Image (spheres, rainbow, N blue to C red):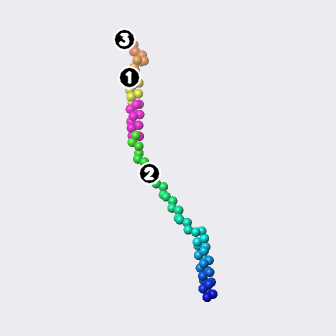
Amino acid sequence: MKKFVIAAALVASTTASAFAGGYAAPVVEAEPVVVEKKASSSGGWVVPALLLVAVAAAIASNGDDNNTPSTPGTGG
């Protein structure tokens, strides 16, 4: 009987420390969700529009020949 009491005391002392903190539900962290945005379609027209404006400005500035001096002998 003495061995039974010692074994029961040993089991009781080891199980008490195992449940000392009580049960806590495990915390599961959610993985971050990465959402890839589709490339903006508005970026495709910016460069050609700027080139068109630059060409239009170059053409407009070349058409003004009023400030050039007339060459002698042309009557102008």
Q: Which residue is mark 2?
A: 35
| Separation (CA) of disc 1 from disc 3 | 22 Å
Residue 73 in sight in this render: no
Q: CA distance from mark 3 to mark 2?
A: 73 Å
Q: Quadrant of residue 69?
A: top left
Is residue 67 placed above or below 43 in the rendered structure? Answer: above
- In this rendering, the label closer to the viewer, 2 or 1: 2
Q: Are marks 1 and 3 in contact (CB under 8 Å)?
A: no
Figure quadrant of the C terminus: top left
Circles 2 and 1, Cβ within 8 Å, touching? The answer is no
Classify mark 1: helix, strand or loop: loop
Mark positioned earlier in the residue sequence (2 or 1): 2
Q: Position of residue 73 (x, y in %)?
A: 37, 12
Q: Nearer the viewer, mark 1 or mark 3?
A: 1
Disc 1: which residue: 63
* Number of other residues with Cα within 10 Å of mark 3, as a class: few under 14, some 14 to 19, many 20 or more: few
Q: Nearer the viewer, residue 12 or 31?
A: 12
For disc 1, the neighbor class at 10 Å (few under 14, some 14 to 19, many from 20) is few
Q: Secondary structure at mark 3?
A: loop
Please give the residue where the numbered disc 3 appears in the rendered image: 75
Residue, x 41% and y 31% (percent of image)? 54
User: Residue 57's spot in the image, x, y percent?
Assistant: 41, 27
- Circle 3: residue type: Gly
Q: Amino acid at mark 2?
A: Val
Above-or-below relation of 24 to 32: below
**Amino acid identity at mark 1:** Gly
Pick out the residue farthest to the top. 75
The magenta stretch spans which residues?
A: 43-54
In which quadrant of the rendered view does residue 53 lie?
top left
**The N terminus: image quadrant:** bottom right
Residue 27: horizontal and vertical position, in percent?
53, 62
